[in-house]
Image: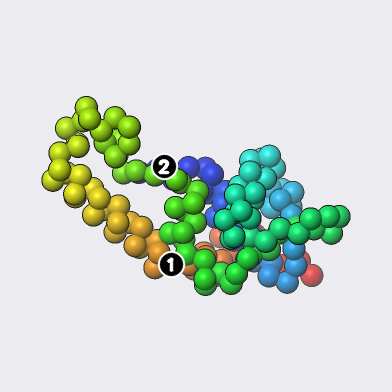
Amino acid sequence: MRLTQFSEYALRLLVFAAAHPDRLVTVEEAAASFGISRTHLMKVANLLVRQDFLKGVRGRSGGLMLARQPEHISLGAIIRVTEPAFSVVECFGEAEGRSLLSLDRWRGILSAAMEAFEAELDRHSLRDLAADPARFGIGPPAA
């Protein structure tokens, strides 16, 4: 089980927005803050706006802000959106007919493990991550 860089960027962008609740943030400043690609972060931002995690304001003074309070954004919901093909092992994907791992009992065990993983993520919100933005390399909110 491995989360992609896309999910990492989504979490970073959401924490960045949560760390600056008093203003709009831009993809450019978040990318610069994290030293990551603006182009990749723009794709992440577009998905997060479409999925109602972020609100986007267009125009010269535009930017991004959280669409709702951090405590109302489940980490599980973020991961389900950013990892749509997430599966524990390949037998849950396309090659299931050829794997010994596709045995019913094994599938049941792995399904329960995945449900527990998602349930644990659902117990936590963006607020849990945003409580200490310095750990993400985010300084104090700009004035």
Q: Position of residue 25 (x, y in %)?
A: 73, 59
The residue under the point 46% across, 46% down is 83
The residue under the point 19% across, 50% down is 109
Kind of residue at badge 1? His
Spatial CA distance of label 1 from label 2 is 21 Å
Q: Which residue is mark 2?
A: 85
The answer to which image quadrant residue 24 occupies is bottom right
Mark 2 nearby-residue class (10 Å; few <14, some 14–19, many ≥20) = few
Q: Secondary structure at mark 1?
A: loop
Whether residue 26 can be seen here: yes
Question: Camera-side residue: 36 or 115?
Answer: 115
The residue under the point 84% across, 59% down is 61
Q: Secondary structure at mark 2?
A: loop
Mark 1 nearby-residue class (10 Å; few <14, some 14–19, many ≥20) = some
Is residue 124 toward the left or the right of residue 42 in the image?
A: left
Q: Earlier in the sequence, mark 1 or mark 2?
A: 2
Kind of residue at badge 2? Ala
Count of all numbered marks drawn on residues in the image: 2
Q: Residue furthest right?
A: 60
Against 46, residue 102 (above or below) is: above
Q: Could you say which disc has been placed on residue 124 in the image?
A: 1
Is residue 129 toward the left or the right of residue 34 in the image?
A: left
Q: Position of residue 80 (x, y in %)?
A: 44, 52
Against 20, residue 50 (above or below) is: above
Whether residue 35 can be seen here: no
Quadrant location, the N terminus: top left
